[in-house]
């Protein structure tokens, strides 16, 4: 993408890669810049199957959204939503019920600009430009208020985004605050990079180190910590597993078949 394109927000730092745009590039998107592509190449050098990691995560998101929609959920709060591309959450949800509503929450300016462009004509979807840690700003935002009825179940989605909240207590508090705001019958959909000592853990360390040079560093956390987020919830089978193992449907062309190479642990759980 050329730096001359008119929609590019004026306040972005084109000298620094952003996880949203690197992830977009790894998925085959075009909402990224040279700096992001160079960073993606460094990620590939450290973890040759990193595209699989991204694809597995995105496919998990699709299966989880369809699961929630099939369970009757019609409202989705997608926190750290990235670029609304490669079949976005509103398209996935609307396949089950066209009346579904989706609020995307994103802080990265290019992802916000892209979302505004794509979602402008979509009646059941909106974008909130906010830091998801600012729970009140998200929940009280006019877009959220106009789209989501907090008296009805909501699927709270944190797909590959919670690990950008570096402080573990703040990350946990953020999850709890959103869950407090939604009624019984709501769902938490989560994927989070794991520091499990399985095959691929050295490569995960390399990615985490690399992320420190981007606009948003990430942190890998243990299976125990990630699982503990679900303690008060009803975990949906198969529980906390790698993204590739959560109700797989196949169909992906992969570099690696090793489950631990998916690197992100994932789960879906219902609020009782
Ligand atoms: C790896 S992408 C994942 C995108 C999408 N959720 C998915 O799973 O396909 C992570 C996204 O989280 C966003 N993000 C990270 N921290 C955030 C925060 N505090 N508030 C809002 N968005 C955040 C990043 O900008 C990025 O777009």
Image (cartoon, rainbow, N blue to C red):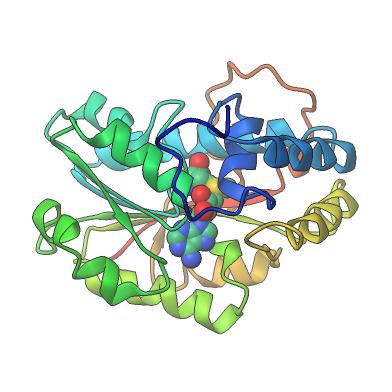
Q: Is residue 245 visible?
A: no
- Horizontally, is 77 left or right of 201 in the view? left
170 shown above or below 207: below
Q: Residue furthest bottom?
A: 169
Query: Residue 174 sits in which quadrant?
Result: bottom left
Total of numbered circles in the picture? 0
Residue 131: image location, x then y, percent: 42, 66
Q: Is residue 43 visible?
A: yes
Residue 271: image location, x then y, percent: 30, 64
The quadrant of the rendering that contains the C terminus is: bottom left
At a point 68% along the width and 53% down the height, the residue shown is 16
Query: Residue 164 sits in which quadrant?
Result: bottom right
257 shown above or below 171: above
Query: Residue 1 sits in which quadrant?
Result: top right
Residue 61: image location, x then y, percent: 46, 39
Residue 167: image location, x then y, percent: 60, 79
At a point 30% along the width and 28% down the height, the residue shown is 91
Which of the two residues, 45 or 66, is positioned nearer the viewer here? 45
- Horizontally, is 61 left or right of 178 in the view? right
243 shown above or below 255: below
At a point 23% along the width and 72% down the height, the residue shown is 181
At a point 25% along the width and 41% down the height, the residue shown is 71
Which of the two residues, 35 or 205, is positioned nearer the viewer here? 35
Which of the two residues, 38 or 270, is positioned nearer the viewer here? 38
Which of the two residues, 135 or 108, is positioned nearer the viewer here? 108
């Amino acid at each position: 993408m050329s730096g001359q394109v008119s929609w590019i927000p004026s306040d972005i730092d084109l000298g620094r890669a952003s996880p949203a745009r690197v992830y977009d590039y790894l998925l085959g998107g075009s909402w990224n810049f040279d700096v992001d592509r160079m960073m993606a190449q460094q990620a590939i050098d450290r973890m040759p199957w990193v595209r699989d990691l991204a694809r597995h995560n995105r496919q998990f998101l699709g299966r989880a959204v369809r699961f929630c929609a099939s369970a009757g959920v019609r409202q989705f709060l997608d926190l750290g939503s990235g670029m609304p591309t490669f079949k976005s959450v509103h398209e996935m949800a609307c396949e089950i019920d066209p009346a579904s509503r989706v609020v995307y929450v994103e802080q990265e300016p290019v992802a916000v600009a892209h979302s505004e462009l794509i979602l402008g004509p979509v009646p059941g979807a909106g974008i909130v430009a906010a830091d998801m840690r600012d729970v009140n700003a998200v929940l009280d935002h006019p877009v959220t208020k106009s789209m989501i009825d907090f008296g009805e179940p909501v699927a709270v989605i944190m797909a590959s985004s919670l690990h950008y909240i570096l402080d573990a207590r703040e990350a946990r508090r953020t999850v709890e605050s959103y869950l407090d705001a939604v009624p019984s019958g709501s769902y938490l959909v989560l994927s989070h990079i794991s520091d499990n000592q399985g095959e691929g853990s050295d490569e995960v360390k390399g990615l985490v180190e690399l992320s420190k040079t981007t606009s948003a560093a990430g942190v890998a956390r243990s299976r125990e910590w990630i699982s503990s987020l679900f303690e008060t919830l009803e975990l949906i089978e198969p529980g906390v597993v790698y993204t590739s193992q959560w109700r797989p449907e196949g169909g992906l062309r992969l570099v690696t078949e090793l489950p631990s190479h998916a690197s992100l642990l994932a789960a879906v759980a219902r609020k009782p």
